Image: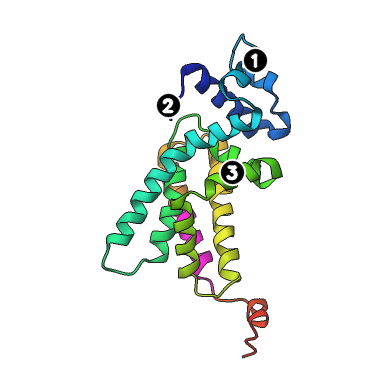
């Protein structure tokens, strides 16, 4: 979908308000003022409602993430070798890192982290996390995890959260690209370690393994 200049101004204003102040601070009036729109009905005219505007933020930012992630997953699928944990983690981390740390003045990672705190935004974000590429990489992570369910699912979810929080923290610092590359590389290594960690004693007890 292509957005007009006034629509992009409203989308960026909404993203900035949520990222910096939380969704509770997001009012139609504040978005209109932050976007420097004279029309007080600009949000309703261009998007319909506040939630529709939030959907537009996600659609705009998730589109390139989803495209790049699918390309990475396709390359993994075409390989004759079985997928490795690092490849799966890279397919999760790198596309979002490119759209946040790799984009000047990005606030998108901080916008996403607000979804961890607010159920309204979380519900909207979940619609986009059901995108095919995200579901595929999540399934891949669970399948590569050396522990069984439900622990493998917990680890995959924790890796998703660690990814978002780490990128949001660095995004807020205004990290320059050379340093960003180091941060992303270390994040990938940390996520691989989390995925491959041996089962804890609590996990063994839950699964009935009393060795």
Label 3, label 1: how many angstroms apart (C-alpha)?
Answer: 25 Å
Q: Which mark is residue 2?
A: 2
Residue closer to the observer: 86 or 36: 36
State the mark number for residue 200: none
Name the main secondary structure of what is drawn in magenta. helix
Give the vertical position of 42 relative to 186 (above or below): above
Q: The residue tagged with tag 2: helix, strand or loop?
A: loop
**Could you say which disc has been placed on residue 125 in the image?**
3
Question: Can you say whether 134 is above or below 42 in the image?
Answer: below
| Quadrant position of the N terminus in the picture | top left
Do we see residue 70 in this rendering?
yes
Q: Which residue is mark 1?
A: 41
Real-space Cα distance between discs 3 and 2? 20 Å
**Magenta stretch, residue numbers:** 186-197
Q: Is residue 194 magenta?
A: yes
> Which residue is rendered at x = 49% and y = 70% of the image?
145
| Badge 3 density bin: few <14, some 14–19, many ≥20, Cα 10 Å | some
* Badge 2 or badge 1: first in the primary sequence: 2
Label 3's element?
helix
């Amino acid at each position: 979908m292509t957005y007009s200049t006034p629509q992009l101004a409203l989308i960026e204003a909404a993203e900035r308000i949520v990222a910096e102040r939380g969704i509770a601070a997001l009012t139609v009036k504040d978005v209109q003022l932050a976007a420097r729109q004279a029309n007080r009905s600009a949000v309703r005219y261009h998007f319909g409602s506040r939630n529709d505007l939030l959907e537009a933020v996600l659609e705009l930012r998730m589109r390139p993430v989803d495209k790049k992630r699918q390309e990475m997953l396709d390359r993994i699928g075409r390989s004759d070798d079985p997928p490795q944990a690092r490849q799966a983690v890279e397919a999760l981390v790198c596309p979002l890192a490119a759209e946040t740390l790799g984009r000047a003045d990005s606030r998108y990672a901080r916008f996403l982290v607000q979804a961890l705190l607010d159920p309204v935004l979380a519900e909207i974000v979940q619609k986009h996390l059901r995108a095919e590429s995200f579901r595929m990489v999540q399934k891949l992570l669970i399948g590569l995890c050396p522990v069984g369910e439900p622990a493998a699912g917990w680890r995959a979810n924790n890796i998703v959260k660690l990814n978002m929080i780490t990128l949001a923290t660095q995004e807020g610092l205004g990290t320059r690209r050379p340093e960003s590359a180091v941060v992303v590389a270390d994040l990938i290594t940390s996520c691989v370690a989390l995925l491959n960690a041996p089962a804890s004693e609590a996990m063994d007890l839950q699964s009935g393994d009393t060795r």
